[in-house]
Amino acid sequence: MHDNFLVERAQAGDSDAFRMLVLRYQHPLFKFLSAYLKGQAGIEDLAQETFLRAYRHIGRYDQTRGARFSTWLFTIAKRLALNELARNRPEVAGPNVETASDPAPLAAETIDQQQRRECVRAAVRQLKEPYRAAIVLSYLKELSLEDVAAIEECSVGTIKSRIFRGKQLLRCVLQEFTEVNL
Amino acid sequence: MTTTKSDCAEVQAAIAWATPLTDTQQEHLHRCPLCRADHARMLRLDAAMDSALQQDVPSGFSERVMTAVANEPLPQLSTAQRLVRFGSSDLAQILLVLAASAVGIGNILRFVVVLFLTQMAVN
């Protein structure tokens, strides 16, 4: 079923339609928020708050203006994530625990998959906005470059340049963390 | 055929955006070692990002969201959206059927009355 149909039903008070939207977007939303926050509990709280805000304000969402539900939802999520970072900066945006406890870069062969994954996440968290949002959103298969541009409120050309620059920065940060040439 | 810096920049940008390469760009990628190396690095980065962004949704998450939603008041709607909501409600559909039936019955009665009056006038 198309998002617009489900949104119309949800606006009409159909909670099953909203449940379908939650099921459709919960996974990409968790992926997106994992680039901003550490810890499953924090991510879950923020994901739940995102859906609750979407429900509360779904009456304001007007699909005739051309915005897709997904871009509207991720705009809410991004604002909440940035607010959370601003409120709790030292904990969520600080250096990653592995590098903090061991300043020497980890050798590539000692990094198992879980550590490597955490290294990449930490590197992404170290990226500054707007590069972080552009990169993470571009990795969500549910969103096109046009959607990412709509969320970031800029042109597709600007998003492309942020992705290009952001990936270069990410490679540099990862190289520092892991000595792996990405 | 020569390779220019602008060709490389164009190909490397397209690789970074994950947009499909044109035939010319594919050809360039095939013969340019710099771009091939960049492409390989980008594939590794993409794989690392795909893996890093894997975040399981905790079981029961959607149920918890819907429980919280159930405690919320109904969404605030604009007048147009209220009309849409009313239009899709059972009550509106019943009223519409009743109104259509009333109009239909009215038309039949009018036809019968006109027929009757015409008959009277003829007689």
Image (tube, grey):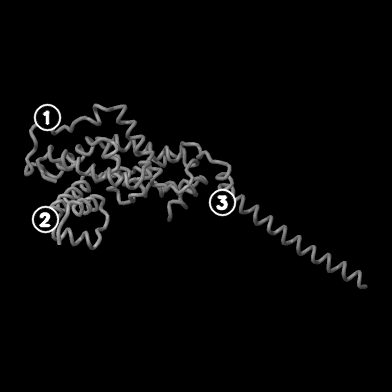
Q: Circle 2 sits in a helix, a strand or a loop, which is it?
A: helix
Q: Amino acid at mark 2?
A: Pro
Q: Is residue B51 left or right of residue A47?
A: left
Chain at numbered mark 3: B
Q: Which residue is the site of mark 1?
A: A101
Residue closest to the eye, B30 or A128: B30
Q: Which residue is the site of mark 3?
A: B88
If the image is split into quadrants, where does the N terminus of chain A sit?
bottom left
Residue A174: give x, y in percent of width and height.
15, 40
Q: Amino acid at mark 1?
A: Ser
Q: Circle 3 sits in a helix, a strand or a loop, which is it?
A: loop
In whole angstroms, how far apart are the C-alphas of marks 2 and 1?
39 Å
The residue sitting at 30% across, 31% down in the picture is A85
Residue closest to the eye, A69 or A38: A69
Residue A8: give x, y in percent of width and height.
49, 49
The mark nearer the N terminus, 2 or 3, is: 2
The residue sitting at 50% across, 40% down in the picture is B75
User: Image height check: is B57 above or below B120?
Assistant: above
Q: Which residue is the site of mark 2?
A: B33
Contact flag, marks 2 and 1 (Cβ < 8 Å): no
**Crowding near the residue tagged with mark 2, few <14, some 14–19, many ≥20 C-alpha atoms within 10 Å:** few
